[in-house]
Image (tube, rainbow, N blue to C red):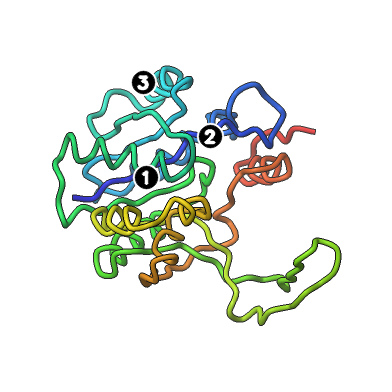
Amino acid sequence: MIFGAILAGGTGSRMNISDMPKQFLNLGDKPIILHTLEKFLTCPRFDCIYVGVHPDWLTHMRDLVAKHIGQTDKIKLVPGGSDRNSTIFNIIDDIETVFGASDEHIIVTHDAVRPFVTLKMIEENIDAALQHGAVDTVAPAVDTIVCSTDGKQISSIPDRSTMYQGQTPQSFNINLLKSLFADLSETEKQTLTDACKICVVRNHPVYMVEGNSANLKITTISDYKIAQAMVGGKVID
């Protein structure tokens, strides 16, 4: 079976323009997270689409789904965890409770605040995860990448042709992801920045599919203004 997993467990503290998490801010005429969820709903291959939501905002998310999408058995809300990966594993726990464990299960994880993901990206993630087991969506780096070990002086300038910007979706065979994560030490777990790094730390190949610059993650106020312009919404000064 194939499962979507929209990760909305954070509180968006870097935005500082509202008391609510950034995924619930309006983008055009509806909250950011609904744009993202609706993109996932366009993919008929999902057996179920999970949304991992901060426990304090589960009721709010449930109300949004009821108001804008209506009753559907295809969407399931679960409490988010303390960080990105714990939210993913909360979703996996529920998948296995409801649908049972299987070597065939695939999970397509995605940031709630990347509302411009395309059906093509989602489909290519599913296909690649079925074939390779671990997938990341990436876009080629368009700017020169500068490395600095002290934050004051340039240490190196790597070859840009080998550099990519990691995006989401990131997709996995569930049993593969679980086994790799279980094999990590507590120290290694502290270094994780996303789910793909679970695979990289254990030297398991991660296949790349093509993203693009429009697959924007809304993290800062500048990102939010750009996203509003992209949907023709009101830009906040």
Residue 160: image quadrant is bottom right
14 or 142: nearer the eye? Answer: 14
The span from disc 3 to disc 2 (Cα, nearest Å) is 22 Å
Residue 91: image quadrant is top left
Q: Which residue is found at the position 43% from the left and 45% from the top?
A: 85
Q: Is residue 187 left or right of residue 181?
A: right
Disc 3 packing (10 Å; few <14; some 14–19; many ≥20): few
Residue 162, given in percent of the width and then of the height, sits at 58, 79
Q: Which residue is found at the position 65% from the left and 36% from the top?
A: 233
Q: Is residue 235 above or below residue 215?
A: above
Q: Is residue 77 left or right of residue 147?
A: left
Q: Nearer the viewer, mark 2 or mark 1?
A: 2
The extreme right residue here reads 152
The span from disc 2 to disc 1 (Cα, nearest Å) is 20 Å
Residue at the spot of label 3: 66
Name which residue type carries label 2: Gly
Residue at the spot of label 1: 40
Q: Earlier in the sequence, mark 3 or mark 1?
A: 1
The tag on residue 10 is 2
The span from disc 3 to disc 1 (Cα, nearest Å) is 17 Å
Q: Is residue 136 left or right of residue 213?
A: left
Name which residue type carries label 3: Ala
